[in-house]
Image (cartoon, coloured by chain):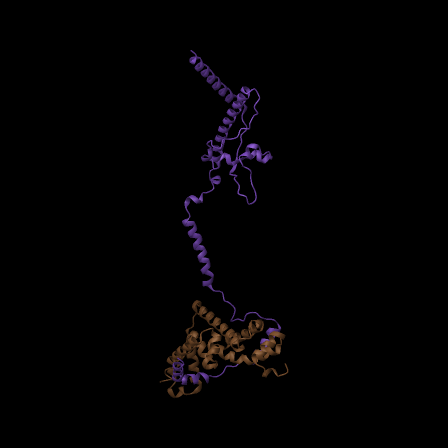
Chain colours: A brown, B purple
């Protein structure tokens, strides 16, 4: 391999890592995907610490199970699938913890998008506040819809890629995205009046 | 179909634009360093988020099922099956019944022996003496003790290693291994009391004499 690693495609890098156990190839892939995965997992889970742990775990799983990757699939969909599964597990664990926890704190469970009451319409145009409200609303959408909305509208993946990651049919992916968006629009109706 | 989705996408265009413009989250600076350190140290333990927490519901659900099954088993089990082991409950009865049966067996033995002696005398010693075998059709005292005589073993003989012909003929050998055993149990053998033997012999002789006299009288009556 004479080209610099940064110019090599993902699939070639993982092949190199699988065949020759080249740690540089692995590091390059980690560098490429750590931020997109952090973004995806953070939007899905809504907790930065847990998100860092999940992405670390994703990379460890990638390192340990490199041979389970098959070259006919895209590397990006494979790594997103691992991260998505770990994020879903984390959400399930949290739900269980919430059910059995004696000292439930409702503030932790439900994002308070009702904060809008304290913001005047002029202030809502302020980007930071607006983003904060959207983020909180996104966490209120059901995980099955949230995942696909994040992958499509935030991560900018194609329907086919999302279909591969989630294991759903493309049609199902599209309808779930629309439902997710509609729910989000409903939650944010004070921002998007029409 | 695609048009519907495109229309909806247009409708939500502002929302989609805002979602795209949400601030991008970046991994912490030491992310790679921590990861590579973990890999070098081969520290692949699950992180705190992955660790499974102890769950009371998970713990109680299976144990509650087991406890319920055990309680139901004892409540619904028929009463008769609880005292299935007759040996454990009726030791004294079994012992007394076995003694009664042994004395009956002793009587049979004496009758057989004296019968054989007579037969030998009448046959002038030409016929070979055949072994007396217990008649399988003869009634067995099975109902009185928890095992049948025809399917049991003389304990004394068995311990001595002299498993006599009767035991073997009856097929009452204690088996081992996977072959199903026909063995039903041990019975107690009492040594015959000499006085009882004498009394029984005298009684049987007198009966025989009486029978012989009756026969001779009948013969005399038949004579013209």
Farthest-out residue, bottom: A122
The image shows residue B211, relative to residue A87, as above or below, that is above
Give the total number of marks visible in the rendering. 0
Residue B30 visible from this viewpoint:
no
Residue A25 in the image, given as x and y percentages of width and height? 60, 78
Q: To which quarter of the image does residue A116 belong?
A: bottom left
Farthest-out residue, front: B224
The image shows residue B189, relative to residue A171, as above or below, that is above
Residue B47 as seen in the image, left or right of residue B62: right
Farthest-out residue, top: B224
- Residue at the spot x=50%, y=72% of the render? A86
Residue B200 in the image, given as x and y percentages of width and height? 50, 22
Q: Nearer the viewer, residue A1 or A148?
A: A1
Q: Nearer the viewer, residue B136 or A40?
A: B136
The image shows residue B58, relative to residue A78, as above or below, that is above
Residue B54 in the image, given as x and y percentages of width and height? 49, 65
Q: To which quarter of the image does residue B123 belong?
A: top right
Quarter of the image with the C terminus of chain A is bottom left
- Residue at the spot x=46%, y=59% of the render? B62
The image shows residue B199, relative to residue A109, as above or below, that is above
Quarter of the image with the N terminus of chain A is bottom right
Q: Nearer the viewer, residue B20 or B82?
A: B20
Residue A170 visible from this viewpoint:
yes
Residue A12 in the image, given as x and y percentages of width and height? 58, 79
Q: Nearer the viewer, residue B66 or A144?
A: A144
- Residue at the spot x=44%, y=44% of the render? B81
């Amino acid at each position: 391999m004479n080209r610099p690693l940064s110019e090599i495609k993902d699939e070639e890098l993982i092949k190199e890592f699988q065949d020759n156990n080249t740690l540089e190839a692995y590091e390059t892939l980690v560098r490429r995907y750590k931020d997109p995965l952090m973004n995806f997992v953070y939007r899905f889970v809504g907790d930065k610490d847990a998100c860092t742990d999940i992405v670390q775990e994703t990379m460890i799983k990638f390192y340990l199970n490199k041979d389970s990757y098959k070259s006919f699939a895209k590397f990006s969909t494979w790594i997103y699938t691992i991260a998505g599964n770990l994020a879903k597990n984390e959400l399930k664990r949290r739900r269980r913890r919430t059910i059995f926890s004696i000292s439930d704190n409702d503030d932790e469970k439900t994002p308070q998008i009702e904060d809008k009451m304290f913001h005047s319409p002029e202030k809502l145009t302020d980007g930071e506040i607006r983003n904060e409200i959207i983020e909180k609303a996104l966490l209120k959408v059901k995980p099955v819809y949230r995942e696909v909305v994040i992958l499509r509208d935030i991560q900018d993946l194609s329907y086919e890629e999302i279909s591969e990651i989630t294991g759903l049919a493309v049609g199902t992916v599209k309808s779930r995205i629309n439902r997710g968006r509609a729910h989000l629009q409903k939650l944010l109706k004070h921002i998007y009046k029409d | 179909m695609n048009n519907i989705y495109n229309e909806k996408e247009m409708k939500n265009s502002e929302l989609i634009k805002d979602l795209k413009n949400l601030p991008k989250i970046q991994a912490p600076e030491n992310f790679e360093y921590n990861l590579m350190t973990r890999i070098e140290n081969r520290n692949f333990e699950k992180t705190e988020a992955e660790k499974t927490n102890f769950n009371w519901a998970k713990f109680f659900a299976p144990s509650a099922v087991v406890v319920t099954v055990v309680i139901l088993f004892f409540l619904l089990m028929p009463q008769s099956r609880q005292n299935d082991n007759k040996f454990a409950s009726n030791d004294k009865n079994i012992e007394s019944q076995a003694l009664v049966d042994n004395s009956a067996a002793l009587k049979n033995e004496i009758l057989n022996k004296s019968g054989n002696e007579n037969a030998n005398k009448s046959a002038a010693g030409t016929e070979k003496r055949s072994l007396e075998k217990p008649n399988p059709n003869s009634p067995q005292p099975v109902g009185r003790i928890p095992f049948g005589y025809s399917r049991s073993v003389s304990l004394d003989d068995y311990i001595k290693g002299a498993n006599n012909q009767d035991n073997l003929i009856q097929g009452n050998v204690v088996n081992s291994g996977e072959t199903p055993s026909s063995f039903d149990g041990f019975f107690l053998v009492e040594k015959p009391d000499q006085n009882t033997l004498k009394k029984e012999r005298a009684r049987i002789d007198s009966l025989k004499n009486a029978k012989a006299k009756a026969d001779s009288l009948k013969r005399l009556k038949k004579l013209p």
